[in-house]
Amino acid sequence: MEAVAQLAGGVAHDFNNLLTVIQGCTDLALSDLGSKQRGDDRGTLVALEDVQRSAGQAAALTRQLLSLGRRDRTEPHRTCLATIMASAEPLVRRVVPSTIDVQVACGAEQPPILVDPAEVERAVMNLVINARDATPDGGTIRIATRVESLSAEDVASHPDAQLGGYAILVVSDTGHGMDAGTCRRVFEPFFTTKERAGGTGLGLSAVHGIVKQAGGHVRVESTPGVGTTFLLYFPVQSD
Ligand SMILES: Nc1ncnc2c1ncn2[C@@H]1O[C@H](COP(=O)(O)OP(=O)(O)O)[C@@H](O)[C@H]1O
Ligand SMILES: [Mg+2]
């Protein structure tokens, strides 16, 4: 459902841009025609008014789709991971059963990053739901933050990384983990090992997209039978 909402939101965003052009051109054509007031243009006038009305209805429809996908709030601004986690924590706790101990250690303040907080919260929710699914017999999910400055060596070994300071959100679990082959594929759209449980395989590709949009990158470390750690790297805004 969340994945469908996200797809709908993405499509609605592009569609809304097209509608803005259609509405703008119709308004211009109508006012042009109105100022000429030519009798033999009546048919064109009526047709254009129909276009205008339909475009207005379609715009109302995309607003509904946008709020479903929550893409209308894709407004990056300066915030920090501690602030985002403070708002996400209640929801995180609600989706995890009491057999799993949830530990959140994000401090009171973190370096500034430029992100849409709603999108980052959605990324965290996707990671937590995966961690929950990987921990059916109970265990621990830990969410923490740290700050790191990437060296040339780090950058060489991670294709999406760049030199500089990063605020990192770390989500780890003590679940069943993944083998190396699964680990390599987790960010692929539609890759899922939850066929029976109705996985969509879109959660982690969304996480990847959200972090990339913010100029960052994602890393994953996992040991079968021990657990998994996802690290979201967000570039620190220095100015
Ligand atoms: N914390 C985790 N522990 C073990 N495996 C995981 C974890 N997170 C993701 N995975 C693996 O990555 C796959 C893709 O995850 P995702 O994109 O969220 O899709 P879905 O959850 O719908 O399967 C999962 O099916 C699972 O095999
Ligand atoms: Mg998932």
Image (cartoon, rainbow, N blue to C red):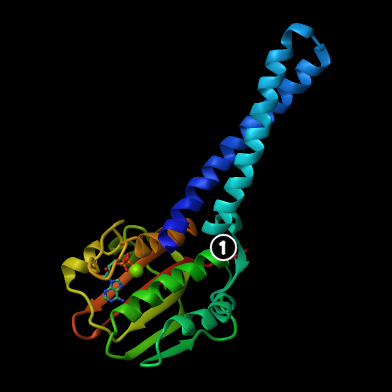
Q: Which of 35 and 57 is in front in this view?
A: 57
Q: Nearer the viewer, residue 52 or 13?
A: 52
Residue 228 horizontal/vertical position (percent): 29, 79
**The quadrant where residue 97 appears:** bottom left
Q: For residue 126, say whether it is visible.
A: yes
The residue labelled by disc 1 is: 116
Query: In the rendered view of the protein, which quadrant contains the N terminus?
Result: bottom left
Q: How crowded is mark 1: few (under 14 residues within 10 Å), some or many (20 or more)?
A: many
Residue 17 horizontal/vertical position (percent): 58, 39
Going 44% across and 63% down the picture, which residue do you hit? 2
Q: Which amino acid does label 1 sit on?
A: Asp
Residue 42 horizontal/vertical position (percent): 73, 13
Residue 71 horizontal/vertical position (percent): 55, 55
Going 73% across and 24% down the picture, which residue do you hit? 28
Which secondary structure, mark 1? loop
Going 59% across and 85% down the picture, which residue do you hit? 108
Q: For residue 216, say whether it is visible.
A: no
Q: Nearer the viewer, residue 137 or 116?
A: 137
When the figure is inspected, residue 39 is found, relative to residue 97, above or below; the finding is: above
